[in-house]
């Protein structure tokens, strides 16, 4: 571990919390400057807490991207919610992310559920309104005022994680809430998960993007072999779990073409991420009700928090 002798160094943990699909993972990727967290247009993309670290001469922040707050329907959901709650408990400050694309008539139940969880903590809460790029200045001001009145916030910071707007000002406020402390991690470290974890997440992201309805939600990825080879491509064998035979058929597609396309897209992104070529093989397995069974969730690392 590095030891910065600089005075007034700030370091702390910041959880990014909010309803599903508001842009939490987009923000952590922007801040660390590398795609470490899956982003898709579908809610419930993130299932684990994901660590992203940013370090400057003045501060080090350990951001925790969290699963969107939801109403649990499966054991998997309960585990996801537990991860979010544990991330809140371990944080110094919390970015509460709101979504500018929701108006007064939208369903804000999950956003309010997230707010009610945060209300119970004594942590610094930093309300941020993401996707500000979607609104005109006038509508944005109206929406900000509505949310301030709804939750009793003095300030809400409008940002666009997608376009990197408003995020510098947001970071200044985040840093001002952190304790004085030397850095916990080396300055070049941006995350702490294994390559296996990131590879599984990349494959899962491609499945989320490519398939509709219940398929993404009934699916998960288990890396069963990850063999690094001197002078040759790494060999990665991944099992994709689905819950029913019919889902297996859809995932594989006619003549295996759909699965092949997933494999190709995933391989390209894995190679970009690892900065080395890989040989990726995907297998589809039916594991009935894996989302409801402790033994599968454990094996998949979902209870690892
Ligand atoms: N217009 C706009 N879209 C955004 C912005 N930030 C994120 N998005 C989009 O919103 C969708 C969801 O983004 P994610 O980062 O996956 O959201 P999340 O909060 O991590 O979602 P979960 O993991 O499902 O809880 C994606 O289609 C993003 O491209 C933004 O600032 N502006
Ligand atoms: Mg996410």
Image (spheres, helix red, strand yellow):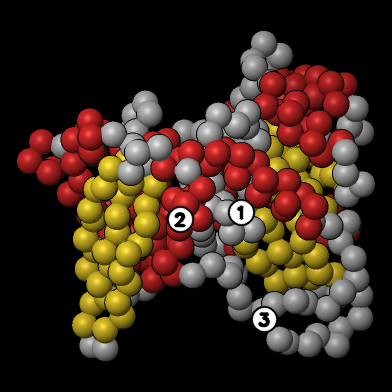
Is 163 above or below relative to 238? above
Q: Would residue 229 be seen by someone viewing this image from the given angle?
A: yes
Ligand 2 within 8 angstroms of badge 3 C-beta: no
Residue at numbered disc 3: 186
What's the CA distance linking mark 1 and mark 3? 20 Å
* Residue at (69, 21) in percent of width and height: 109
Rendered image quadrant of residue 57 = bottom right
Q: Secondary structure at mark 2?
A: loop
What's the CA distance linking mark 2 and mark 3? 28 Å
Residue at numbered disc 1: 49
| Coordinates of residue 125 in the picture (x, y in percent) | 84, 44
Q: Secondary structure at mark 3?
A: loop
Residue at numbered disc 2: 300
> Are circles 1 and 2 on residues that touch, CB within 8 Å?
no
* Residue at (39, 47) in percent of width and height: 220
Rendered image: mark on residue 167: none
Is 122 above or below relative to 71? below
| Coordinates of residue 175 in the picture (x, y in percent) | 83, 60
Of tags 1 and 2, the one toward the viewer is 2
Quick one: 197 or 298, which is closer to the camera? 298
Tell me: 264 left or right of 79.
left
| Coordinates of residue 116 in the picture (x, y in percent) | 81, 31
**Label 3: few (<14), some (14–19) or many (≥20) C-alpha neighbours in 10 Å:** some
């Amino acid at each position: 571990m590095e030891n910065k002798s600089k005075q007034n160094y700030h370091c702390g943990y910041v959880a990014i919390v909010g309803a599903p699909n508001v842009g939490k993972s987009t923000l952590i990727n922007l801040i660390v400057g590398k795609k470490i967290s899956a982003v898709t247009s579908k809610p419930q993309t993130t299932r684990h807490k994901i660590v992203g670290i940013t370090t400057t001469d003045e501060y080090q922040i350990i951001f925790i991207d969290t699963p969107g707050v939801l109403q649990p329907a499966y054991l998997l959901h309960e585990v996801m919610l537990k991860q979010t709650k544990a991330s809140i408990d371990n944080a110094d400050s919390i970015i509460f992310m709101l979504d500018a694309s929701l108006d007064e008539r939208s369903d804000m139940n999950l956003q309010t559920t997230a707010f009610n969880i945060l209300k119970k903590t004594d942590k610094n809460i930093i309300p941020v309104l993401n996707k500000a790029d979607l609104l005109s200045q006038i509508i944005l001001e109206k929406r900000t005022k509505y949310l301030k009145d709804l939750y009793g916030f003095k300030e809400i910071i409008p940002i666009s994680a997608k376009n990197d707007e408003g995020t510098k000002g947001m970071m200044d406020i985040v840093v001002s809430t952190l304790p004085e402390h030397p850095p916990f991690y080396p300055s070049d470290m941006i995350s702490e998960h294994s390559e296996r974890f990131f590879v599984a997440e990349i494959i899962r992201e491609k499945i989320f993007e490519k398939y509709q309805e219940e398929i993404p939600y009934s699916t998960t990825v288990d890396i069963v072999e990850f063999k690094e080879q001197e002078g040759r491509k790494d060999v990665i064998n991944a099992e994709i779990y689905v819950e029913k035979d019919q889902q297996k058929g859809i995932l594989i597609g006619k003549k295996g073409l759909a699965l092949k396309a997933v494999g190709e897209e995933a391989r390209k992104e894995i190679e970009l991420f690892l900065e080395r070529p890989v040989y990726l093989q995907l297998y589809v397995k039916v594991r009935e009700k894996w989302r409801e069974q402790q033994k599968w969730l454990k094996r998949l690392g979902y209870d690892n928090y």
